[in-house]
Image (tube, coloured by chain):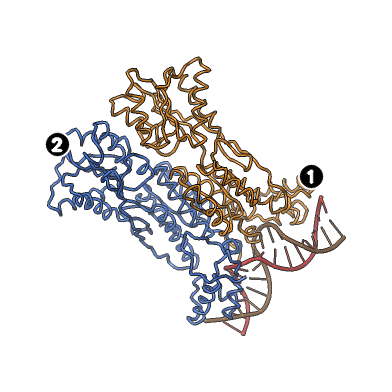
Chain colours: A orange, B blue, C brown, D red
Amino acid sequence: MPRAPKPAASPDEVVRPATGVTLYDVAERAKVSGMTVSRVINDNAHVSEKTREKVMRAIEELGYKVNVAARAARVGTLRVGLLYSNPSAAFLSAFLVGAMGQCSRSGAELILEHCEDLKTQRKAIERLIAKGADGVLIPPPLCDSRSALKHLKEIGMPTVAVATAKPSPQASAVRIDDYDGARSMTKYLLSIGHRDIAFIKGDPEHTPAQLRYQAFIDTMHEEGLQVPAERIAQGMFTYRSGLLAARELLSQKVRPTAIFASNDDMAAAAIAVAHGMHLQVPEDLAIAGFDDTPVAVTVWPELTTIHQPIGDMGRAAVELVVEQVKEKRSGHAPTLKHHLMPYTLEVRESTTLDA
Amino acid sequence: MPRAPKPAASPDEVVRPATGVTLYDVAERAKVSGMTVSRVINDNAHVSEKTREKVMRAIEELGYKVNVAARAARVGTLRVGLLYSNPSAAFLSAFLVGAMGQCSRSGAELILEHCEDLKTQRKAIERLIAKGADGVLIPPPLCDSRSALKHLKEIGMPTVAVATAKPSPQASAVRIDDYDGARSMTKYLLSIGHRDIAFIKGDPEHTPAQLRYQAFIDTMHEEGLQVPAERIAQGMFTYRSGLLAARELLSQKVRPTAIFASNDDMAAAAIAVAHGMHLQVPEDLAIAGFDDTPVAVTVWPELTTIHQPIGDMGRAAVELVVEQVKEKRSGHAPTLKHHLMPYTLEVRESTTLDA
DNA sequence: CTGAAAGCGCTTACAG
DNA sequence: CTGAAAGCGCTTACAG
């Protein structure tokens, strides 16, 4: 008995064929063999342009979607390893949502491996290999470890670094432009009238911290504004460090009119400190963060911040690594790609009453 | 190549066969047909006990794992719909991680559908059906909507409510015991010496809010302690409402020695208010939350809270719904199950210096 | 209760 | 550049 026909769905909604259209339907319509259709959907080079176009048209007309399960059954499941150390829970889960979604779309499997610290990297990588990883994703802060990248390069493992500010030439990377993002935020604060802006730096070990700070300083200078040393406080990206930094900044005789913290946790802490001093946010003090993690919309007022599309970065990272694994399997040298994702400036109540 | 026999993998280990052992290897070893092995791994009733045992032994000895992709290729992908409204980002992503993981293990596909408010439920459910959902997962606050559950019941859609405090007899549910959790927290606060404990209630529309409050009151009474009206503040589960509630509680002449907030966002707000009043946490005031969302370990001091295993709940919910869909397909009436997950008390620095 | 055969939708050799 | 055949690992009829 034939299966109950599934209702049709528009192409970008559902990923798996709701249509029941198979490769052979496409082949028939395009008057080629199934083999040729397979070549087209797998971007195989040995197809004439004319044939490719015919097939593409048939795919479009029939709304064909490859059946990932069938492909995986034939070709084996590709395993994407994720080597994580101690990113924030917020970052990791947002990233996982994107990465897992793309994995199921590509018929790949995501395997996780925790890596305590830099010393145990090598072992963690070996565990990943033992679990059958064909490629590896490395989120921060591990993505900035030269030795990890070097090791992976040596053993020929396709690798994608995620959210690193200083991408290594050793591996592919998916990231936002931290410099540009911090620049946008600074410009925004200037645009709403602030001139005396304080900055809370992040953990100096993390590459994004350096770029965000540099962008802030450069942008202020471009506007002809000096930033006195007492307007800069050192933080470590933790809420607690933000508490200390904000106290330092706000205990001056003359207070800044705005604080730009290099991540949301520290910005949230700055709000708490401001409230403790009976300062209204944003009336007495504007506060901005970076990353748009869940805490940004948990605190009140909600944080103006730079949104990193972390889920999309997870998706893109999986796409990149899958591509590299396939290239490697077909004997090609993997092409390293650096994918820059768009950030957005999220204006909320911590900087303006109009948000 | 044979591998060391290994016991069934725990859920978080690798799921796909790293072994390359197929159903036929098992069949050969057990001296039965592949068909019979298939029956055993699918819990088909028509297998003699003796045969089943033989097969199970062979599966164990060879470390056989079903190839989910191959199965999906043959049998079609089962679609699990997730109807979410506006849960916290933290809840949703933790839940998704668990649900997606289980989906890929079961060879199911997760399809998401957003539902603005209670009025548009019906439409959202129809969109989910149009996308081919075979079963539905409903996280809070929608899980408490009688009309949604009734509608799903009427159309015979397998449904699992997640994290509802008052499970409906209409549908299966996966949850923790909110009453018991709040009771543990209250007992813990009593055990470390607090007698004068204030409570911040949650949104009265949400069922967990009611139970958490009731458990607090009951437990205090059991200890022979009265809770004066001024020790209870109404919150709405938001950070902002926690700010207001905490101010109210802490502006009394005699302050409580501890505050138990019915979720982490409000507890985090209480910490901020306490700090603003130059109170040390936990020395001057202990503060506890509920849920163990990321904010619990973001703020400083980190929050003592009740950990909900949200990821595991996502996993369990998918398992339940898949089971029901299969029962439905094979013509059986779906058995409703209420799965109670274990919570844990996470003791951190917001209540004790020893954490 | 058990099994031999066919087929899910795709890809991998192998030809031409 | 293109295609006919075989097979991935599993399950669905259909027999016995």
Q: Is residue B214 visible?
A: no
> Of A37 and A235, which appears nearest the observer?
A235
Query: Residue B336, position in %: x, y?
Result: 38, 63
Q: Which residue is drawn at the image coordinates 30% and 56% (left, top)?
A: B177
Q: Secondary structure at mark 1?
A: helix
- Single out the residue that lies furthest toward the top: A224
Mark 1 is surrounded, within 10 Å at the Cα level, by few (under 14), some (14 to 19) or many (20 or more) other residues, namely few
Q: Tell whether label 1 touches label 2 (CB within 8 Å).
A: no
What's the residue type where badge 1 is placed?
A: Glu
Q: CA distance from mark 2 to mark 1?
A: 82 Å
Q: Which mark is residue B254?
A: 2
Mark 2 is surrounded, within 10 Å at the Cα level, by few (under 14), some (14 to 19) or many (20 or more) other residues, namely few
Q: Which residue is drawn at the image coordinates 78% and 53% (left, top)?
A: A31
Total label count? 2
Q: Quadrant of residue B353?
A: top left
Protein chain holding label 1: A
Protein chain holding label 2: B
Query: Residue B311, position in %: x, y?
Result: 42, 53
Q: Is residue B173 visible?
A: yes
> Of A244 and B335, which appears nearest the observer?
A244
